[in-house]
Amino acid sequence: MVAPVFCFLVVVLAGAQAVQPDDGDWREGFRQLQQMMMTFAEDINSLKMKVEMMDSAEEIKTLKVEMEDMRKTMATADVGLAGNDGDDLSRNKRQIYCEDGLTEEAETSACTLGLRGRDGRDGAPGRDGAAGRDGQPGLQGPIGEKGDIGPEGPQGEQGEKGEDGDGGIAGGSHFTHSGGGANYVCLPKDPEWGVFMDGNQGSSYMQGAEYQDAQFGNSPFQGASVYDHDVPCAVCHVASRGSKLMIPARLSCPSGWTMEYKGYLMTERYNHNRSEFVCVDGEPETRPGGQGNVDGALFYPVEADCGALPCPNYVQGRELTCVVCTK
């Protein structure tokens, strides 16, 4: 519908060029033609809006062909007008066809701009970028709080019997002597001598040891009394376990340790001179023929004494146990 109108404008323009009327008629005719071109421009904008609203590709294609024909016709009209009034035409409307439709450029023009087209669809998501480089190691965090003490482990296995030896005799300093050694020792039954001088010269003395377990009626041992009997001893070796641990107040070994024996903790009496705490087997043996109250180094049971020692779990006056473990 717009194309026939535009063709009519071209015919009128051609006739105007052929007749060449006087100056007043020409200007009146040019004014009317300008009005018709403004109407044409509005029709062009209307067509562009229709293109934007069309969904059919075939309809869009047909309309674009129609618009191309209009552009060619209008270009012919511009050429015809160029030879009649250069000053007037320089101020008139020029139309340039672009790939995406018609746009207008003019110094003075009564044409209105077309509506802005709709936004295009979003593009497809891009591909993932390459992995970044590893960052610098962070600062070391603060030391955490100490955790709770874990549950007690299972009792260790009973150890295999150690190698048999000749056995020995327990010894130490006399309980009344303030000097001398403070520990018990295991003496062999058959000593070997070096340079010696018989007789006492008043230096230091090694005494044998006796049990004093029943002096106050608190012997922890079951069976026959060992009171005033001499104390035997033994030094053991377990080839597969090189570490030894004596634990007082326990009858079992930690997990991973092997129990060698268990019994009771013993030492000198509290008002005698100091000695050491040792673990005596719960089934004590005695040295044959060694019974008699001749004293020397003495072995007393050790009792719990509450105060700095917490009660409970300890109990005032109760004899303490012990265990020897290896690993």
Image (cartoon, grey):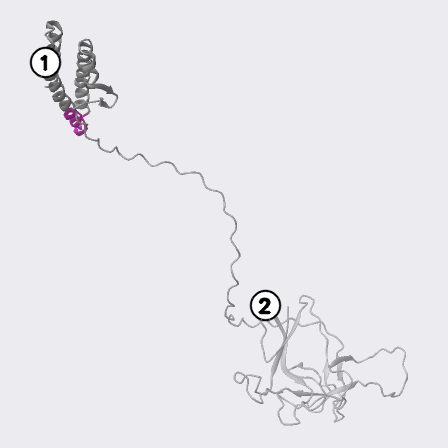
The quarter of the displayed image where residue 64 is located: top left
For residue 186, say whether it is visible. Answer: yes
In the image: residue 248, left or right of residue 140? right
- Rate crowding at label 2 as few (under 14), some (14 to 19) or many (20 or more) other CA atoms within 10 Å: some
> As shown in the figure, which amino acid type bears the numbered disc 1?
Gly
Q: Secondary structure at mark 2?
A: loop
Residue at 13% x, 20% y is: 40
> As shown in the figure, which amino acid type bears the numbered disc 2?
Gly
Magenta stretch, main secondary structure class: helix
Q: Please tell me which residue lies in front, 62 or 243.
A: 62
- Rate crowding at label 1 as few (under 14), some (14 to 19) or many (20 or more) other CA atoms within 10 Å: some
Residue 230's spot in the image, x, y percent?
73, 87
Residue 61's spot in the image, x, y percent?
19, 21
Q: Please tell me which residue lies in front, 8 or 259.
A: 8
Position of the N terminus by quadrant: top left
Q: Which residue is labeled 2 in the image? A: 256
In the image: residue 37, left or right of residue 182? left
Image: magenta residue range: 45-56
Which of labels 2 and 1 is toward the front?
1
The quarter of the displayed image where residue 251 is located: bottom right
Q: Which residue is labeled 1 in the image? A: 29
Q: Is residue 5 magenta?
A: no
Residue 19's spot in the image, x, y percent?
10, 5
Total marks in image: 2
Residue at 13% x, 7% y is: 17
Q: Please tell me which residue lies in front, 322 or 274.
A: 274
**Real-space Cα separation, disc 2 to disc 1, in angstroms:** 119 Å
Q: Are marks 2 and 1 in contact (CB under 8 Å)?
A: no
Decide which of tag 2 and tag 1 comes sooner along the chain: 1
Residue at 14% x, 24% y is: 42
In the image: residue 68, left or right of residue 309? left
